[in-house]
Amino acid sequence: MDYFINLSEFCGNINLSAESAMFFIDEGIICVEKRENEFYIDEKAADDLIIISEIKNELGINDEGVSVILNLRKKIIDYQNMLSTVFDAVKTSKSIDELIFLMERSESFRNILTNLKEL
């Protein structure tokens, strides 16, 4: 079951301004739920806000810079997951023909190729 944390209280605890929190909400990076004129966040949003606060406070980076860092971080994680899929297929296939067969029929591999073309 999800639990929700009051956004303003949480931001006070992690030394993050309300303006910064609203920036990341407006950017779609943080999702909130509004109840009785108060914003609440779930555990994932709380974890993301902690990362944001650490980047801002420890590195002195502004909100726009943090947004760029978070987007790059997400892309890196996505590419790591795609590579993991490729390596798993290489490990489990018994022949090059089987590997090619998997690659031609797998949506994961098509997504990988599409993403690689975008680089």
Image (spheres, helix red, strand yellow):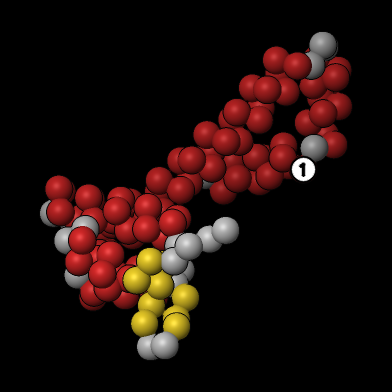
**Can residue 115 be seen here?**
yes
Q: Residue at x 47, y 75 (%)?
A: 33
Is residue 4 or residue 76 the one in the foreground? 4
Compared to residue 115, the image places residue 36 above or below, namely below
Q: Residue at x 54, y 42 (%)?
A: 78
Compared to residue 21, the image places residue 90 above or below, namely above
In this picture, residue 30 sits left or right of residue 83? left
Estimate the x, y position of residue 119 in percent, counting from the top left. 52, 44
Furthest residue toward bottom: 37
Furthest residue toward top: 94
Estimate the x, y position of residue 61 in percent, counting from the top left. 18, 56
**Can residue 23 be seen here?**
no
In this picture, residue 83 sits left or right of residue 28? right
Classify mark 1: helix, strand or loop: helix
Is residue 50 or residue 63 the one in the foreground? 50
Q: Residue at x 38, y 77 (%)?
A: 39
Q: Residue at x 60, y 45 (%)?
A: 115
In this picture, residue 71 sits left or right of residue 12? right
Identified by mark 1, the residue type is Glu
Q: Quadrant of residue 85?
A: top right
- The residue labelled by disc 1 is 107
